[in-house]
Amino acid sequence: MDKRKVLLIVRDGWGMYRPDKFNAVVNAKTPNMKRYLQQYPNTVLEPAGEAVGLPKGYQGSSEVGHLNMGAGRIVIQELKRIMDMIEDGTFFGRPALKAALDNCVTKGSALHLMGLVQDEGVHAHQGHMYAIIRQAKKIGIKKVYIHFFADGRDTPPRSALSFLKMLEEVIKENPIATVGTIMGRYYAMDRGEKWALTDATYNALTRAEGAKAASAEAALNDAYATLKNPNGQPIVDEYIPPTIIGDYPGMKDGDSVIHFNFRQDRAIQLTKAFVEDNYPGARWKKMDVAYCGLTRYYDEFKFSALPPMDEGGGMDDLLGQVISEHGLKQLRLAETQKFKHVTSFFNGKRTEPYAGEDQVEIKGTWDPSSFGEHPEMNAPEVRARALKEIEAGKYDFILVNFANCDMVGHTGIYPATEKAVEVTDASVGMLVAAALKQDYTVMVSSDHGNAEEMWDYKINMPKTAHTTNPVEFIYIAKDAGKVKLRPHGILSDIAPTVLAVMGLEQPEAMTSESLIAE
């Protein structure tokens, strides 16, 4: 095969599923995608569970998907790494985690556990929290405060009560623990530099400032009965305001804080409030606490329980690195919501670009709470910049992400999600036409599903979470008639496919296979 330039388009949250009145992918008008599937070679990829380094049956995510796509091998995810370490007994020997726990024993101080309470394993897993509670009791810690970040996005919109009930069973066995605060991930896990949200979270955690409730259950029930989302709809878990439970006194200097999220992007801002001298928000004071996060949330953060993937994690020879080492130019382009995914996550969680790699972030215009009213998001601007760069022909490899299907799918608003699918289809169509004129080979795929399954029939509510459904991979090129693809693959097969088309040798560390059949 001749050496070619490659354009890889990720339609974030666009999966494959049976026809259904809540399948926005099937029901939307998608003339471009329908034509490509008839005209060009295509295959099916697995984006979830063991195919992407997660435990069997777990939904994929944008982080996991981009990590696998860029690595060219199945990347064992932190969710599984932590579970395995808890099982084999090595988890609580990790230095940063041990230091945080030992601090409470030595000083007789309180342990604060904060994180997203979910079982989907996208950002965190409640099982990790339970294990830490049990270990705290075992080593003699006297008081554990749980700061319950409600989900409602990777999990059903009003599922926090059921997660609270499970937690209360663990508390019964370990009465040293109690819920200190509860709040939605919108506040506690902002990643859009809306520092006022992080400030409100920090104030609730550290000095018990916020709404008050007698119990976590009362906080949720009161919110469900009286409050609205920012878009005026009845409130869901994601938007529960910071609420102080019972007589929670706040934090004291000398306490320990463990953030049990393992995914990095939505743990950065709150972590900076605790550990950085130069915090961008409005912090009343920097607490003197022993802090630990389960993973390295950003390069300068040193208090992580797990070693970073790029330090002994076998994350060399990724797609971006191979392209760079051959002196070729590459571009990564996305709007704010997916910018870290096409850059850091695609590069194995490295935060500095490779030589010859340009990164373009189209700043997001809309707050995530209003994506249902603006399903186009910033696709027009992403599209315009991509067209400009494709036509210039400067780059040998271009990665573009359209966030619409995923981010609008998370709102649970079906008509808006159908519109998001149509915006994505139209945008991809324009990019493909321009790329073919410039002799690019175009690969169209997805990191995981979402928009194709918008109703949860088990609980009779909108489904806002990712799915475990497969995704398409479409190979579009002038010579596509000569190309045959393997009938099935996984996301990490994309990197070897890109290298094959670009005429670059696949490194040994890249253990997945090209989707192009020999």
Image (tube, rainbow, N blue to C red):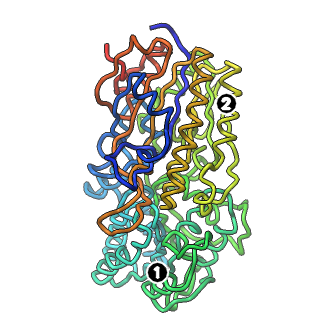
- Name the quarter where the N terminus is drawn: top left
User: Relative to residue 364, is residue 180 drawn left or right?
Assistant: left
For numbered disc 1, what is the local secondary structure? loop
Picture coordinates of residue 276, whole percent (x, y):
66, 60
The amino acid marked with disc number 1 is Gly
Picture coordinates of residue 348, whole percent (x, y):
49, 38
- Name the quarter where the C terminus is drawn: top left
Q: Which residue is rendered at x = 45% and y = 57% of the image? A: 123
| Disc on the earlier residue, 2 or 1 | 1
User: Relative to residue 369, is residue 446 drawn left or right?
Assistant: left
Instruction: Find residue 141 and report its image quarter.
Output: bottom left
In this picture, is 336 found above or below 330?
A: below
Picture coordinates of residue 392, whole percent (x, y):
71, 20
Q: Which residue is rendered at x = 67% and y = 30% of the image? A: 358
In the drawing, what numbered circle is on residue 76? none
Query: 10 Å neighbourhood of mark 1: few (<14), some, or many (≥20)?
Result: some
Q: Which residue is rendered at x = 63% and y = 43% of the image? A: 379
Query: 10 Å neighbourhood of mark 2: few (<14), some, or many (≥20)?
Result: some
Instruction: Find residue 431 and report its image quarter.
Output: top right
Picture coordinates of residue 428, whole percent (x, y):
56, 33
Q: Which residue is mark 1?
A: 108
The amino acid marked with disc number 2 is Asp
Q: Is residue 312 visible?
A: no
Between 394 and 477, the one nearer to me in the picture: 477
For numbered disc 2, what is the local secondary structure? strand
Instruction: Find residue 515 and report its image quarter.
Output: top left
Between 97 and 408, the one nearer to me in the picture: 408
In this picture, is 388 found above or below 269?
A: above
- How many marks can you see? 2
Q: Which residue is mark 2?
A: 358
Calculate the distance from the C-alpha at mark 2 to the C-alpha at mark 1.
50 Å
| 2 vs 1, front mark | 2
